[in-house]
Every structure is written in structure tokens, then in C-alpha cells.
Image (cartoon, rainbow, N blue to C red):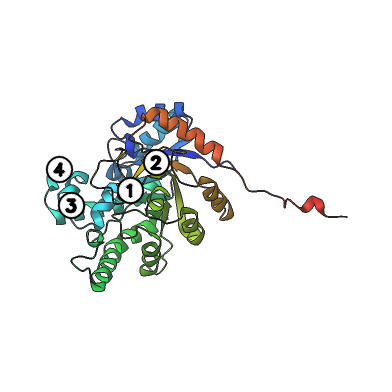
């Protein structure tokens, strides 16, 4: 059961899509998780223009690649986030400084994502949902329970019409559990599913790198949420607390070795990928293993190729026999 190995194109959106596809093939990947920014994928065009969707598929075919998911992280963030000037960088420039216009654009584009996925022949959209309450995670001044309750309700109100559109096209949404999201750890993920009444449309894009530095054991998350794992990111992180560095990062840029933790290329951090593969086997996950390559301390083309090789090496199939069957007498 060799799962397909893909790479998320989000960190490569500075390159034209066709140029990147050529590189991805040379690195050894089976396909791509297509990010909906740069020139990689325009959601409105993919949803409404059959020729545009066919062009994306033709580029993939030309390079012997496939896609199993598209990524809507930036636009999804704009749906549920509490606006500040940083969000302007994720939205069209004409909406800068206009929170309601940014949100309206984002909701419409997320609805387009359902049709775009269908037209591209994929059944999963990965991404973020934003959070009206993330900025209040440290409760001083006090964050009341009512504020948290209201935030979850707002997310349900905002995303229900989007998920209705997803259901129309038979598409699932896989939230990447991640700081800045309404669900950023084990218990917030558990609550989010409950708030949506365990709606099958909503599941998770599992990414261990965002869990491990928070102290959440990634393979335990996988085990407990197995039914809702719709996509998997392969990504590593290293915790390097040294008595000076704090786990919150000290406002030091990613990659700086003084930080208390950093994203690392696969196999160079602290994530236990063997137990992750064992849990994926136990839940019979047969979807792609999508490398999200982020390591500010390593040249990215070297890292992307090495990461592909790492995933192929660490992935293994479950046994189809019990190891002690041969000990039985006739």
C-alpha cells in the first residue's frame, strides 16, 4: 500500500505553476496539493471556466503528476478571522482595510472552492477557517467563557453556508489544526466537531508540526480523530528550549537558531513519524502523504527532494499476517 507522495505548493507560489510542476517531478513526487494563490489556482476560474480547469489538469498530466487536494489556507483565514492589517496581505488589494469586503470575498471564494475541486477531480479541500477569538488566547485581560462560546457560534454561522455548497458537490473540507485557527489543539478540535454536530463535511488535515511544539502527541491526535482525518501533511518541527528561549518564539523570525522551536525539513526534527504511519495504517488511511516543506535553515530544492525520499522510506504497509501464525501446529 504505497501511498502517493505529494508536495503542497503554497511555499512555492513564487514560481509559475508549470515551472514548479517540472521541478516537483524531478524531485520524485507523485503529485501536488495545489495552493490557491500565486498563479497556481484561481478558485473562481476553476469553478466557472471549464477551459481553465482543463488547463491545470493538462499541466499536471504533461509532467506525470496528479492532485488529490487543493489548499485554501489564505482565503479560508479571511472568512473567520478577527481583522487586523496583516489580513490585507491575503485578500485582493482593493479590499485592504475593509474587513467586511474581505470577508464577503472570502466566503464567495470558499464557495467557489467546492466547484473548483469537483472540476479538478478531487474530493478534499484543505485549509484554514480563521478564529474570532485566537487573539485572546492568553486570558489577560480576561477572556470570558461567553467570548469563547460566541466565537465558536460565529464560526458555525459563517461556515455553514460554505459547507452547504461543499455538500452540493460532494466535497469535504479538511481544517489544518493550527495556531490562529478556531481549532488549534486537541480539545479545540474536539469542540469544533461537536459545535458542527459532527457534520461529515468537516474533518482535519493532520499536520504534526503544529501539534508537537504545543506538547500534543501527534499520533494520539490521529488515533482519537481517525474518523475525521481527510488529508495528511508530512511536516517536522524541532523544540530547542535552552533555558533562554521560550516556547512562544520571542518575536524572533522563523529559522533563527535562538528560537525555542522551528519548523524543520522532514527527519530533522522531533516528530515521531513511525508511530504516525502505524496509526495511519490502523485507520486504513490510503490518501496522499503531502509534504509541506518549511525549513528556513535549508536550501529548499535540496530539502524538497530529500523530504520526498524520507517519506518513501518511512512509509510502510501493515502486515497481512499475524507474526505468530507460523508458531501454530496443524
Going 17% across and 55% down the picture, which residue do you hit?
83
Residue sitting at 28 percent across and 55 percent down? 180
Rendered view: 136 above or below 208: below
Identify the residue position indicated by label 3 in the image: 102
Q: Residue at label 1?
A: 243
Check disc 4 and report the residue beneath it.
93
Query: Do tag 2 and tag 4 residues touch (Cβ < 8 Å)?
Result: no
Residue on which disc 2 sits: 292
**Image spot of residue 169 (x, y percent):** 39, 54
Q: Nearer the viewer, mark 2 or mark 1?
A: 1
Residue at left offset 34%, top offset 61%: 164
**Percent x, y of residue 45:** 29, 42
Front-lying residue, 268 or 286: 268
The reply, left or right, for residue 88 in relation to residue 179 is: left
SS label for mark 1: loop
Q: Is residue 171 visible?
A: no
Inspect this view and state whether residue 13 appears.
yes
Q: Quadrant of the N terminus?
A: top right
Mark 4 and mark 3 lie on one chain; the one further toward the N terminus is: 4
Amino acid at each position: 500500500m504505497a501511498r502517493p507522495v505529494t508536495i503542497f505548493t503554497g511555499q512555492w507560489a513564487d514560481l509559475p505553476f508549470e515551472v514548479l510542476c517540472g521541478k516537483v517531478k524531478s524531485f520524485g513526487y507523485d503529485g501536488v496539493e495545489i495552493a490557491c494563490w500565486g498563479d497556481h489556482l484561481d478558485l473562481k476560474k476553476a469553478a466557472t471556466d471549464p477551459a481553465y480547469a482543463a488547463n491545470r489538469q493538462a499541466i499536471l498530466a504533461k509532467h506525470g503528476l496528479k492532485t488529490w487536494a487543493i489548499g485554501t489556507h489564505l482565503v479560508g483565514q479571511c472568512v473567520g478571522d478577527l481583522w487586523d492589517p496583516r489580513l490585507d496581505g491575503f485578500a485582493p488589494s482593493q479590499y485592504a482595510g475593509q474587513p467586511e469586503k474581505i470577508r464577503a470575498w472570502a466566503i464567495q471564494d470558499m464557495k467557489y472552492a467546492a466547484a473548483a475541486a469537483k472540476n479538478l477531480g478531487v474530493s478534499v479541500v484543505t485549509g484554514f477557517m480563521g478564529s474570532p477569538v485566537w487573539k485572546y488566547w492568553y486570558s489577560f485581560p480576561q477572556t470570558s467563557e461567553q467570548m469563547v462560546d460566541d466565537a465558536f457560534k460565529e464560526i458555525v454561522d459563517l461556515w455553514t453556508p460554505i459547507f452547504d455548497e461543499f455538500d452540493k458537490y460532494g466535497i469535504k473540507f479538511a481544517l489544518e489544526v493550527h495556531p490562529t485557527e478556531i481549532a488549534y489543539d486537541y480539545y479545540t478540535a474536539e469542540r469544533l466537531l461537536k459545535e458542527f454536530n459532527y457534520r461529515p463535511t468537516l474533518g482535519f488535515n493532520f499536520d504534526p508540526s503544529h501539534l508537537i511544539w504545543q506538547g500534543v502527541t501527534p499520533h494520539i491526535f490521529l488515533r482519537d480523530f481517525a474518523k475525521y482525518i481527510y488529508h495528511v501533511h508530512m511536516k517536522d518541527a524541532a523544540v530547542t528550549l535552552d533555558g533562554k528561549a521560550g516556547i512562544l518564539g520571542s518575536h524572533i523570525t522563523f529559522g533563527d537558531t535562538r528560537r525555542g522551536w522551528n519548523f524543520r525539513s522532514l527527519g530533522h526534527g522531533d516528530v515521531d513519524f513511525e508511530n504516525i504511519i502505524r496509526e495511519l495504517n490502523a485507520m486504513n488511511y490510503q490518501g496522499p502523504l503531502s509534504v509541506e516543506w518549511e525549513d528556513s535553515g535549508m536550501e529548499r530544492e535540496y530539502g524538497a527532494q530529500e523530504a520526498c525520499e524520507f517519506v518513501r522510506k518511512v512509509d510502510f504497509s501493515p502486515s497481512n499476517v499475524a507474526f505468530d501464525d507460523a508458531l501454530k501446529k496443524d
